[in-house]
Image: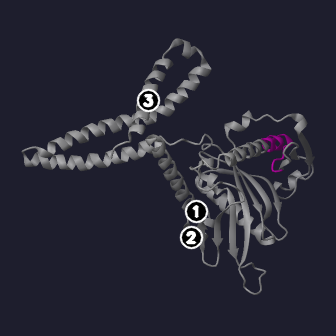
């Protein structure tokens, strides 16, 4: 139950940096420089939790050493008390070390962001569109249970129900941290209502989860690179918008990316939402390109997040869901479709953290 030399040295450096930051934040020149003061304050807050946990770890280590020293005391009562202390302090130290390792993990800067969640019907025709509708309802129920707000941005309905494409925005604390592993191909196996011979059909939908993080504000789009069309909304936007051309469609000419928004009555609001979605897609495109270049070195993701990658199978006849990235199978299909997606999200997050901890250990020992 000891931290590696590499991790201990890193913690010592963080403690020294926190002391340095405390001195800087008390300096008059820094206080008068609002931007620098804000930057240093954020860094101080981020480091503070780690250093506090490290100080607790140091104190527990010293107390445990003292307790072990008393195990050889000539008095039996003192030895028994020391043995109890060793067990208690050992458990506390182990928990403290686990907390420290998690605090040292690199945090995705987008984890706290709201997200754009897009669902598109793939192979399977009408059945795929119906499944897209099932997925939308699943995420709506999940968002509601989590206290998130889900807005419908645009939708193209299927011929017999469901959706060919539906785009939503989910707002809430750590929405991206919880939903980012949903990106990929979701496959469904079930008997369609129109199947007379009772054969199981396989269909698929792709899900994309894009963070609406601060980074999108840094993306600049030249006016000449954008074609803007307006049109009358239909379907999910509601009949109240059909009288005016409030819906907008943006086409980014260099990449061919097309986004549209028709959910708001106001064209101004639809423009703002469409621009945010376009920037999120451009950022996702840039990150995907960067990720593909670094694929050989990449160790910390559960799956690649590529929308072409099959991540999950929903088997209706057997009432089970299998996540292929971590070989997890749960026989709770009904519960998951009712919004209990955490049954799948939590194991994925735990696996991701385990991979990060392994990487941290490799870096520390290098």
Give the mark nearer the N terminus: 2 vs 1. Answer: 2
Q: Is residue 256 left or right of residue 360?
A: right
Q: Measure the alpha-carbon separation of dots 2 and 3.
A: 47 Å
Q: Is residue 342 left or right of residue 287?
A: left
Q: Which residues are magenta?
A: 262-275
For the point 73% across and 33% down, the residue is 218
Front residue of this view, candidates 291 and 176: 291
Mark identifier at residue 340: 1
| Label 3: which secondary element | helix
For the point 25% across and 39% down, the residue is 63
Q: Is residue 31 above or below residue 82?
A: above
For the point 60% across and 75% down, the residue is 319
Quadrant of the rendered structure where residue 228 is?
top right
| Label 1: which secondary element | loop
The residue pinned by badge 3 equals: 13
Mark identifier at residue 332: 2
């Amino acid at each position: 139950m000891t931290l590696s030399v590499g991790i201990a040295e890193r913690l010592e450096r963080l403690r020294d940096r926190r002391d340095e930051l405390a001195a800087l934040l008390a300096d008059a020149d820094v206080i008068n420089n609002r931007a620098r003061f804000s930057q240093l304050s954020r860094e101080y807050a981020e480091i503070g939790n780690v250093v506090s946990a490290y100080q607790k770890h140091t104190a527990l280590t010293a107390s445990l050493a003292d307790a072990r020293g008393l195990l050889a005391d000539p008095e039996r009562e003192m030895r028994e008390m020391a043995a109890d202390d060793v067990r208690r302090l050992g458990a506390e130290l182990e928990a403290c070390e686990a907390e420290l390792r998690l605090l040292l993990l690199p945090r995705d800067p987008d984890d706290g962001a709201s997200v754009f969640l897009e669902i598109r019907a793939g192979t399977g025709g009408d059945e795929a569109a119906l499944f897209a509708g099932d997925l939308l309802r699943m995420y709506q129920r999940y968002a509601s249970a989590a206290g998130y707000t889900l807005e419908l941005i645009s939708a193209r309905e299927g011929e017999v129900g469901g959706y060919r494409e539906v785009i939503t925005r989910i707002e809430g604390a750590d929405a991206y941290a919880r939903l980012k592993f949903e990106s990929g191909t979701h496959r469904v196996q079930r008997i369609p209502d129109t199947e007379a011979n009772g054969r199981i059909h396989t269909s698929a939908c792709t899900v994309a989860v894009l963070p609406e993080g601060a980074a999108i504000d840094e993306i600049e789009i030249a006016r000449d690179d954008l074609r803007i069309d307006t049109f009358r909304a239909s379907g999910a936007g509601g009949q109240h918008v059909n009288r005016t051309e409030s819906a907008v469609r943006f086409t980014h000419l260099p990449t061919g990316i097309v986004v549209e928004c028709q959910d708001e009555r106001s064209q101004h609001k639809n423009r703002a939402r469409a621009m945010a979605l376009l920037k999120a897609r451009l950022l996702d495109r840039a990150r995907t390109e960067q990720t593909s270049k670094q694929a050989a070195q990449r160790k910390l993701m559960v799956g690649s997040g590529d929308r072409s990658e099959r991540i999950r199978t929903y088997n209706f006849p057997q009432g089970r869901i299998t996540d292929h990235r971590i070989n997890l199978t749960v026989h709770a299909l009904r519960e998951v479709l009712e919004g209990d997606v955490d049954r799948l999200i939590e194991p994925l997050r735990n696996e991701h953290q385990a991979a990060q901890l392994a990487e941290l250990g490799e870096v520390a020992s290098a």
